[in-house]
Image (tube, helix red, strand yellow):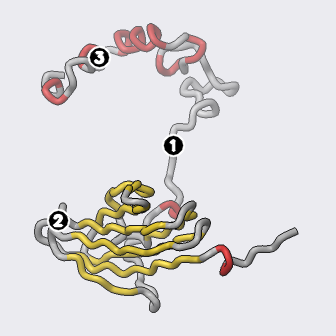
Amino acid sequence: MRLIKPFLHECDGPKIKVFGSDKKEWTCALLEEIEADQLPAFYGGTMTDPDGDLKCPSKFNMGGKIPSSYYLSNNPPVAKDYMETMSIGAGGRKKLKYDVDVARSILKWEFMTEGGDIKFGLSIKHAKITNDLVGLSHVDSHLIMEEGEIVCEQPGKYVFEFDNTFSYLRSKKLRYHILIETPSSLNVIEL
């Protein structure tokens, strides 16, 4: 506890209890917080599985092997032929501005970076007021293609921001495609 105490907030220290290998000591502490019939017998309670297993694996999912379909591939995203390219220098940022003239238009984007992650944000400027639609935050666009869309509830200037100011040494190559679909260009079927 002495090792981690300097890293804890003063309010959190009293909430943490550290026990040694004395099973009686830590099982009593668990029973102060958890009813005995809700705690597996292996941990000092009275609950058992129907087959008598003291760890109660049928009642608690103790994890297991992560399916490979959940893995991120080690292959970086591949730029599409129709994407435009822009370089963002170390410590730099770029803004792309798009005028949306028709309400209910759909603004779609996809982008990837080469050279590392980047900060991305989207805002609207309307009548000299700027509102964030997507707050500026890091995206791992060097690992996976970043895609999104938003319905433009009102006309205005929509500003995409790509921020590399956190990177002092590494410039990024941005490959992107941004599309505006107006309501008249969408295939709408009326019943």
Q: Nearer the viewer, residue 87 or 56?
A: 87
Residue shown at the point (88%, 68%) measured from the top left? 191
3 or 1: tag closer to the N-terminus: 3
Q: Residue furthest right?
A: 191
Nearer the camera: disc 2 or disc 1: 2
Q: Is residue 98 left or right of residue 56?
A: left
3 or 2: tag closer to the N-terminus: 3
Q: Is residue 140 left or right of residue 56?
A: left
- Quarter residue 176 falls in: bottom left
In the rendered structure, are the residues bearing label 2 and label 1 in contact, judged by CB atoms less than 8 Å apart? Answer: no
> Where does label 1 land, which residue?
63
Residue shown at the point (53%, 77%) measured from the top left? 180
> Where does label 3 land, which residue?
17
Label 1 Cα neighbours within 10 Å, binned few <14 / some 14-19 / many ≥20: few
Could you say whether the residue bearing mark 3 is in a helix, strand or loop?
A: loop
Could you say whether the residue bearing mark 2 is in a helix, strand or loop?
A: loop
In the rendered structure, are the residues bearing label 3 and label 1 in contact, judged by CB atoms less than 8 Å apart? Answer: no
Could you say whether the residue bearing mark 1 is in a helix, strand or loop?
A: loop
Residue 53 percent coordinates (x, y): 60, 27
Q: Which mark is residue 167?
A: 2
Q: Nearer the viewer, residue 177 or 127?
A: 127
